[in-house]
Amino acid sequence: MKNLPKLIPAMILCITTNFSMAHTIEVDPATHLDNYVTFGEWNTDGDLEGWTSHNLVNVDAYDGSITGTVSGADPQIQLNLAVGNRVKLDAGSIIELRIKYDADASITNTTGQLFFYDYNAGTFYNVHYADYTDYQIDGNYHVYRVTLSSNIPATDRIRIDPLGSGYDGQTISIDYVRMKLPQMIDPIDATGEYFSYSVEGSLAEWNTDGDYENWSVVNMSPNSVFGGYLTATNNNDGQIYKQAVNGLPAIDLDDNNIVQVRMKRETNYVSDVDVFFGTANNPGVSGARQSRLWRDAIPRDNDFHIYRYDLSVFSTWEGTLETLRFDPSWAANQEVVVDYIRIGKIIPEPATLGLLSLLGLAFLRKK
């Protein structure tokens, strides 16, 4: 299970902004999340994974869930992210909870709610995950999924209000809290799924010393290719890019939606990490075709991490690839080490390697 953020002890009551109209609610959706980041799994008995509670008693983690009994108005659980860590929820982001309510509960005139704290504005953004008609009251687990159609400001605090007031004695169990974002760090692929890419989709590997594979390195010096990595020190607005005229393959974007990069940055990094793209119909780079992984979501541990960008959220991600640009930093004098740049998609695990041969596929597994 993915390491979860550390707790900052606090529960702060703030002004709330109603954001409930800007999303779609699904209960027990037919499709599953094929990749995600997790904010709560509770797979270790007794480990609350940094979540605190309010107006819930007998709160504990066991059998893979966090469970508590309502005692008071406005019951809730909350996770404060580690200092300096933020999550950016752009349009298209998916938030998914798996929750069990008592079979004998009578739930009316209340809503299940999520709150995301905008630390700049001092405001909680409120997102409903269930109106009272959506609740499944049968003593079994059900999945509640919210898909955002508008952006939420970067948040450093996540709160779940599973019920309103007047439900004392009701027991609630939450199996997991997961999010699928257009940009993710170290995503988890669902069981039976994996990131797959073709030989052409292996855009940069740098496995031969001195061979830049026709990628241009701009505003980053010194730089080198050695030991399977591209290593470079940023001067100002560092860029690593390749175009079709330099051998960038004309990847079919309708069948490949994910750009994935494995990279290591220095501990004191404070800059965003961007991907720009151009297509045969929209060549070159543009701010309108830019995907940003926000700096405060990136671990500062001088270790390798997977940076995953789902570019299918752009209407211009269609046709064939013409330009790809990766901006690992705009902070001066910072070193980056890039292992690879790949483009592909999430697919089901093949039953056997023989099945791959039979289908004529040439997929490589990620490192």
Image (cartoon, helix red, strand yellow):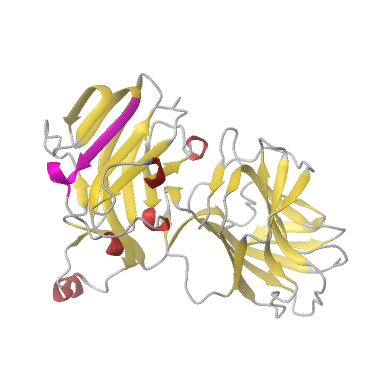
**Residue 171 horizontal/vertical position (percent):** 76, 68
* Res 195 seen here: no
> In the image, is 260 to the left or to the right of 227?
right
- Taking depth in this image into account, of 156 and 55 the one nearest to the observer is 156
Residue 359 coordinates in the image, percent (x, y): 17, 75
**Of the pair 118 and 79, the residue shown nearer to us:** 118
Q: Is residue 119 or residue 101 the one in the foreground?
A: 119
Q: Is residue 161 left or right of residue 294?
A: right
Location of residue 46 by image quarter: bottom right
Tell me residue 180's x, y (percent).
49, 57
Q: How far across and down, in percent of the image, does residue 136 sit?
A: 69, 77
Compared with 216, 56 (above or below) is below
Dividing the picture into quadrants, the one containing residue 72 is bottom right
The magenta-colored residue range is 237-248
Q: Is residue 250 visible?
A: yes
Magenta segment: does it hold 243? yes
Q: Nearer the viewer, residue 47 or 129?
A: 129
Identify which residue is drawn at 33% across, 58% down: 257
- 225, above or below 213, in the image: above
Tell me what residue is drawn at x 86 percent, y 58 percent: 73
